[in-house]
Amino acid sequence: MAGRQLAAVHAGLRSSARAWAPCPPARTPPARRTCCQDPRTRSARRRDRSAPSPRPRLSLTFFADGVENPANLARIHDAASLFGASYSTSITGRLIAVENAAGARDIYGRRPLRGDATLAVGNERRGLSRKTLATADEVVVIPTQSRTITTLNVAAAAAVAAWYVLRGSGPQGRAKRPEARRPSLLIAGDDHVEVGSSLRSAAAFGFHDVLLEDRGAGWFDGPPGVRREARAAARRHKNPLRVHRAMLDSAARYDRIVLVTPSGPGTPLQREGLARGDRQLVIVGASPNELGASATDRLTVATLGLETVTLAPLRLIASIMLAEIARQVGRRHRVPGLAGRFPRYEKALEPMPAGDVLFVESSDLLAF
């Protein structure tokens, strides 16, 4: 009897086991995705921070619009080499025009260039053409601080504009007495046109006195033809700059000496203080090993960080340096309530009455 009951029990267990649904297999967690299907939906925080971000492509082209003097064209080509740029007769990318035009933006206080751009400079007398100005994406002006010398040599202007367009800078400040902050300046040069153009830039940026070590440029004792060309490059007929004969040995009497070089080791020029007054001497056109041992303890070498070339034209290096000095020295504060001075004319043109005809010779008009 007991055996039959046990057999029945086992039979019931086997039948109930067959009626139950089989257990599903254990759930396997989904594999973690190793990459996102759409990279645009990935968060910036989940990107691979170890991979460096690509640097923006940058290309600067110099464009001379109507420049006539072959020597100026050659110096514009030299400026392109110094900046690792190119020279072209066509426009590539953003067009930046350098011109003293109404509404132009100061070259100071801008961010470094990003992307392709063309830097356009104009004719020595007429400036940029109307077509170039009309198509320009931006018009910039190099602020000057002289009432008589208000422009730079065209190649020097191209170098100064390229310097600030590529690197950017802070704005030009304001000072109660800028002349008290302006350092002393010594230029050393052996080419009369380069020296003359550098003296023109010095006057344009507010200098009244300059020390000159004439290394054969003929500014003081050169032949009459050389002196005429040098003074024409300096715009001497309206340049009130006082030029003093000097030697590098005179640097020993200054408290601080800054020697500016186009390339090589040294403090970047924009990080060097250049507004310490007339007890600071800034030198351009010389090398550090030319200074005597008595001045080395006060000497700081500042570099423009340009491309290394065989011979960097003095006018380009000096003009960039002078523009940076002018930016750091600043302009005079405007006096509130003081109206600006306007030109006064002793004569004026009036329309002729109807029917009257007046013939004027060109020589009489020029004499007027």
Image (tube, grey):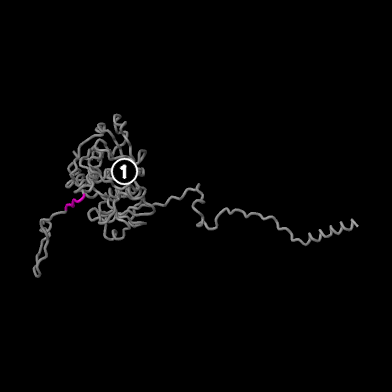
Residue 53 in the image: state x and y as whole percent. 46, 50
Question: Is any part of residue 305 visible from this angle?
Answer: yes
**Residue located farthest toward the front when viewing the structure as drawn:** 1
| Residue at x 27% of width, y 56% of height | 103
Q: Residue at x 9, y 65 (%)?
A: 358
Toward the viewer: 150 or 212?
A: 150
Q: Amino acid at mark 1?
A: Ala
Which residue appears farthest toward the bottom when viewing the image?
355
In the picture, measured across the screen, residue 21 lies left or right of residue 88, that is: right
Is residue 275 placed above or below 341 in the rendered structure? Answer: above
Q: Is residue 168 left or right of residue 237?
A: right
Q: Is residue 339 magenta?
A: yes
- Seen from this angle, which residue lies furthest top? 294
Residue 58 lies left or right of residue 20; in this view the side is left
Closer to the camera, 154 or 239? 239
Secondary element under disc 1, as helix, strand or loop, is loop
Residue at x-position 28% and y-position 34%: 256
Left or right: 9 in relation to 357: right
Q: Which residue is mark 1?
A: 312
Magenta stretch: includes residue 189: no
Q: Position of residue 279 (x, y in %)?
A: 25, 35
Nearest the eye: 148 or 103: 103
The picture places residue 48, in percent across and down from the top left corner, at: 51, 49
Looking at the rendering, the stretch of residues picked out in magenta corresponds to 336-341
Residue 61, percent from left and from top: 35, 53
Q: Residue 309 lies in what quarter of the image?
A: top left
Magenta stretch, main secondary structure, is loop
